[in-house]
């Protein structure tokens, strides 16, 4: 038989108590430190969706950001030699291809878009990025209860126009394209051509 004396029993109880206290301390520490990881404050150089559409001025700034991005040559195909006016002009035979044009321009001029994975993919990606931003703006402006009626109508009109403008050029370049009308990326990734 196995017998425990009082000293051995006391040592086992002491070790159990120490282990329990150590485990409890670790558990409490982990639970309180996880809140800091889960509750991430917004970055100081940006604003949340709610704040972006809380005043007329901040909501207008969202659209100013759209137009500023579109007006830069590196903004993704709206202006410049690799912009939508040049690409659509070449594809519609409104422009004549000079010797200064590269392989991309020659392929667009011949309507050989299959070989233009890089150039057309860049336009596709940039345009759908702006379409997502338009849809987010439409949702944000529509959900805002603090915007004035005139600002709300103007911003909704600008967003609808910009979305139509983007789709107009996408259809001119690619034919039928997926029509994403909201920001739900799970649904938008399953959209077919329309």
Image (spheres, rainbow, N blue to C red):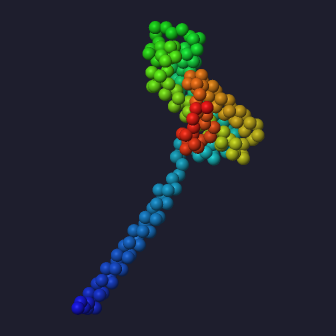
Q: Taking the image as drawn, is residue 139 in sight?
A: yes
Q: Is residue 20 left or right of residue 39?
A: left
**Corner quadrant of residue 30:** bottom left
- For the C terminus, give its image quadrant: top right
Residue 101 is situated, as x and y percent measured from the top left of the image, at 47, 12
In the image, residue 29 sits, relative to residue 66, either above or below, namely below
In the image, residue 150 sits, relative to residue 2, either above or below, namely above
Q: Which residue is drawn at 59% across and 28% down?
A: 176
**Corner quadrant of residue 180:** top right
Q: Is residue 164 left or right of residue 77?
A: right
**Corner quadrant of residue 24:** bottom left
Q: Which residue lies furthest to the left in this view?
A: 1
Q: Taking the image as drawn, is residue 68 in sight?
A: no
Residue 155 is situated, as x and y percent measured from the top left of the image, at 69, 35
Q: Which residue is drawn at 72% across and 47% down?
A: 145
In the image, residue 9 sits, relative to residue 141, either above or below, namely below
Q: Count the marks.
A: 0
In this rendered view, identify the residue nearer to me: 103 or 146.
103
Residue 36 is situated, as x and y percent measured from the top left of the image, at 48, 58
Q: Which residue lies furthest to the right in this view?
A: 149
Q: Which residue is drawn at 56% across and 30% down?
A: 127
In this rendered view, identify the residue nearer to me: 136 or 71.
136
Residue 10 is situated, as x and y percent measured from the top left of the image, at 30, 87
Q: Residue at x 55, y 14 (%)?
A: 90
């Amino acid at each position: 038989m196995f017998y425990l004396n009082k000293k051995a029993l006391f040592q086992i109880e002491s070790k159990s108590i120490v282990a329990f206290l150590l485990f409890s301390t670790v558990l409490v520490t982990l639970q309180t430190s996880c809140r800091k990881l889960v509750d991430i404050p917004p970055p100081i150089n940006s604003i949340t969706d709610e704040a972006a559409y809380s005043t007329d001025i901040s909501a207008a700034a969202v659209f100013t950001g759209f137009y500023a991005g579109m007006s830069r040559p590196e903004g993704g195909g709206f202006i410049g030699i690799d912009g939508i006016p040049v690409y659509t002009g070449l594809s519609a035979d409104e422009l004549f291809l000079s010797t200064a044009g590269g392989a991309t321009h020659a392929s667009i001029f011949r309507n050989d878009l299959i070989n233009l994975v890089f150039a057309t993919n860049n336009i596709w990606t940039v345009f759908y990025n702006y379409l997502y931003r338009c849809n987010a703006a439409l949702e944000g402006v529509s959900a805002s209860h603090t915007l004035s009626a005139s600002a709300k109508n103007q911003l909704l009109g600008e967003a609808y126009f910009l979305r139509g403008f983007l789709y107009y050029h996408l259809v001119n370049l690619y034919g039928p394209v997926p029509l994403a009308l909201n920001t739900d990326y799970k649904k938008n990734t399953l959209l077919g051509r329309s």
